[in-house]
Amino acid sequence: MAMADQQTESGGRITRVAGPVVTAEGLTSGMYDVVYVGEEELMGEVIEIDGDKTLIQVYEETGGIKPGEPVEETHQPLTVDLAPGLVSSVYDGIQRPLDTLRAEMGDFIDRGVTAPGVDLDKTWEFNPTVSEGDPVEAGDVIGKVPESPSITHRVMVPPNVEGTVAEIEQGEFTVEETVCRLEDGTEIRMRQEWPVREARPYETKHRPTVPLITGQRILDTLFPIAKGGTAAIPGPFGSGKTVTQQSLAKWSDADLVVYIGCGERGNEMTEVLEEFPELEDPQTGNALMDRTVLIANTSNMPVAARESSIYTGITIAEYYRDMGYSVALMADSTSRWAEAMREISSRLEEMPGEEGYPAYLAARLAEFYERAGRVETLNGKEGSVTVIGAVSPPGGDFSEPVTQNTLRIVKVFWALDSDLAQRRHFPAINWLDSYSLYESDLEGWFEDEVDEEWGDLRTQIMDILQEESELQDIVQLVGSDALPEDQQLTLEVARLIREVFLQQNAFHPVETYSAPQKSFKILKGIQRFNELAREALDEGVPVAEIKDTSAPAELAQARNEEDFDPVYEDVMQMMEDEFAELTEAV
């Protein structure tokens, strides 16, 4: 955070300490202003003002703090540093760079330590894109900086600033040095500061007509999400929320990924921190970290910092959106954030809502998700922030308040199912409970870019899965052999859809990512099997012989082939030949 250099002499005294909530008197701060609490100057934020009493949520452990210690004011809101150097960084919930702090003090961070979000001493190569005499206004790009092999940082005129360029030059600069001076004397640097609770401005918001390609077949085909859209992944413990979000972070076609580990277990966050630097970006061939910002706020960190981590992440995402990038933000999980709100609310002695959550739970969730969108930026470019939030309902109960309030806001619901996970079906997304409200908006894109049969094929597949669900009740009573042969064939085709198409191995080097074109061909292969099988059944071929054909197994194996297309063509020809032999033998 950018508040360390803004401390003042004004302040008050602590009168009460209740966990992360501290009460002080003698302050003149406004709501959400940053203050520094106690002798160790722990960072906190004003969350309630009652006469002369000011309540502060502290973003660090408050053990040892006692009444009478000083509170220093800044009279500034919580802000985030926005400048070259964000990409590839790993931050805690209040944007302290963990790599920098670890180099100074080892594996354990001392309390009261502050550090700027970006390196103030590092120089960057600034290349101007405007000249002296050019008029500029809020959001205009005045220069570019090669921030990483994958991301070019576009230095923008801050909001509410406009004028004519009086001086600008190319060269090596720190983020604190002036790179451009306007005729009215305004100096523009590469570093901006922005209040985390305030959404960054844009011109207009576009309709969600462009999909975020995730590389996950069940998502892209059955429950797609648009760029600038919102999605929730609720599921019980062990159902694969974190692995699904990590797969989305690795393989989605966003230009930049902001991954927020909000209150998750330390071992899961460790996997992310260890794995991401080793992964290769499938889009560029560079390291995946070259287009990733990680925010690590694990479950053993102070609860108040969880709220800060969510707002820090969305503000960074909006900043790169304003440059014209497509940003995917993964929040894992918003349930931990809600639990932190519940704890803070109880210490404030507020009237509890359902299951003890504060009455403003829905408003806070909406405030977060509504900052997503595909927009025309102030500089006329198109950028987007797609928000995908994991929800961890206790016991997998989707009726609990966090899940229900989230579902009222988001447009995509990917329901994880513990029964599927126990059967080792991954991703364990229940195709009957999940939905996407972007389906009709995105169908045109898929039909133009993949195949004109996309919408019809998707409908056919969902109809078969729905019919299978209805038949399962009968199967459990009398067994599948008692069904008519055409219904037995429906169950067989549904099994192929589940095992060949819906299942996807996140740890296989090829199968972990499936382009929409590949996904369509797999579905097309299953559809062709269904057509040929029903024709054969009408010719008198027993359903048992249809099940014994080898083409479906070969199609399943073809998914793992790096050179998929020629193998797929061979499998399709094999399928035609096999059914020709079956019908000739009748």
Image: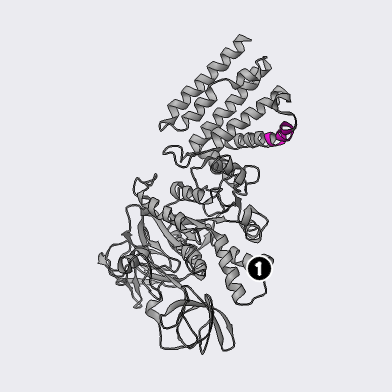
Quarter of the rendering containing residue 523: top right
Magenta span covers which residues?
468-476
What quarter of the picture does the C terminus occupy? top right
Mark 1: which amino acid? Gly
| Rendered view: 474 above or below 109 | above
What quarter of the picture does the N terminus occupy? bottom left
Task: Residue 48 in the image: state x and y as whole percent.
Answer: 57, 80
Task: Residue 462 in the image: state x and y as whole percent.
Answer: 64, 37
User: Considering depth in this image, is 270 or 177 the residue closer to the camera?
Assistant: 270
Task: Residue 451 in the image: state x and y as whole percent.
Answer: 53, 35
Who's the residue at 27% across and 66% down the image? Answer: 122
Side of 455 relative to 258 (left or right): right
User: Considering depth in this image, is 380 or 314 the residue closer to the camera?
Assistant: 314
Residue projecting furthest to the left: 171
Residue bearing mark 1: 356
| Rendered view: 83 above or below 549 | below
User: Considering depth in this image, is 369 or 288 the residue closer to the camera?
Assistant: 288
Side of 575 relative to 478 (left or right): left
Task: Residue 52 in the image: state x and y as whole percent.
Answer: 56, 89
Quarter of the rendering containing residue 439: top right
Q: Is residue 470 magenta?
A: yes
Q: Is residue 367 visible?
A: no
Q: Is residue 263 magenta?
A: no
Q: Main secondary structure of the magenta part?
A: helix
User: Considering depth in this image, is 220 or 45 the residue closer to the camera?
Assistant: 45
Who's the residue at 42% across and 59% down the image? Answer: 294
Who's the residue at 56% across and 48% down the image? Answer: 239
Label 1 secondary element:
helix
